[in-house]
Structures are given as C-alpha cells and as structure tokens.
Amino acid sequence: MVKSTIQVLLRQDINLLGKNGDLIQVSYGYARNYLFPKQIAVPATKQIIAFSNKQKLIRLEQIAKERAIAENKKNALELVSKFTLRKKVGKDNLIFGIVTNREIAELISSQIGETIDKKNIEVPEIKTVGIHSVEVKFMSNISANIKLQVLPLAE
C-alpha cells in the first residue's frame, strides 16, 4: 500500500497550513508536486526534526528575553506619572500643528533614557492643550498607557 501522507518541515509561513519551522502532516502528492519544488518545505528526517526542536527552544528563549525587556520598559514608563510637552499655541488653546509620535518618542527617551520606536506609539489626534492619554505598545500583549500633558510654549 502506498503511503498517503508525509511529515514535512515548513520553511516559510503558509496560510491555513502553518508557520516557518512547523512540522506538519500533508498528502504525499501535495508535498512532492508543490511544497518541495517551490522549496516551501523539506521532508522531515530525524536530523531535521532535532534541528527544528533546537531552533524552537532558541526562539522561545529569545522571546522570553524580549518579553523581559518589554516589561522593564513598561515599568519604567509607568513610574513616571506624566510627561510634559510644550507646544506653540494660538487662539482658544489650539496647538499649531499636531503632536506626533516622533515628538513623544524623543520626550520619553530624554526623560527615562529608554529608546522606543515611534511606530509603537499610538497617538490620538491632539490639537488642544491639556492632559491626553497615549498608548505605547512593546509587544502584542504588553503595552503601557501614559499621560501626556501638553502645555503652551512660554515665549
């Protein structure tokens, strides 16, 4: 009887199939005709399975280190009660321009010494003087809410 399925190791992410490094069971024809020629997957041998398991352990350790760094940055942000930013204002306390995530990243960096990528800062549209809430995301489930106080620039 012909073997109908084969275990393969994926070399890249495939929707509805798995992620890079996953060991999956697929039909032999699908593997032979599509996955192997396009080098999306390789047959799972004992050596490849052992290598894959070692890579997963290394990746889990790396994620744990990144999570610890993210938690430290979150705690450092939460220790500071609020950040103060001075902007030029006009009539009715309206700010000239808007507050950008780059400005907030520079402010955080100068006050706590931690560098935060501006892409991780979600700024609501701030056009007035006052206290506003800003979310800083470090990882998918680690984020901190900070209070941003916008004050008029003393001239």
Image (cartoon, rainbow, N blue to C red):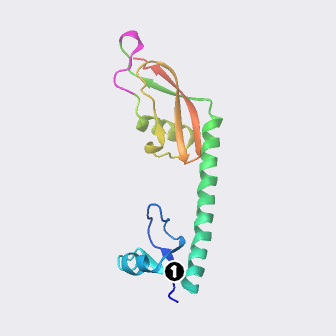
Place of residue 97 in the rendered image (x, y in percent of width and height, measured from the top left): 34, 25
**Span highlighted in magenta in the image:** 91-98
Residue located 52% across and 71% down the image: 21
Could you say whether the residue bearing mark 1 is in a helix, strand or loop?
strand
| 78 versus 133 height, above or below | below
Residue closer to the observer: 73 or 109:
73
Q: Who's the residue at 36% across and 14% down the image? A: 90
Residue reaching furthest front? 1
In the rendered image, which residue does mark 1 sit on? Answer: 6
Please, what is the dominant secondary structure of the magenta stretch?
Answer: loop
154 vs 51, left or right, is left
Pick the quarter of the image with the C terminus.
Answer: top left
Question: Does the magenta run of residues contain 99?
Answer: no
State whether residue 154 is above or below residue 143.
above
Q: Please name the amino acid that badge 1 sits on.
A: Ile
- Choose top left, top right, bottom left or bottom right for residue 79: top right
**Residue pictured at 61% horizontal, 64% vertical:** 60
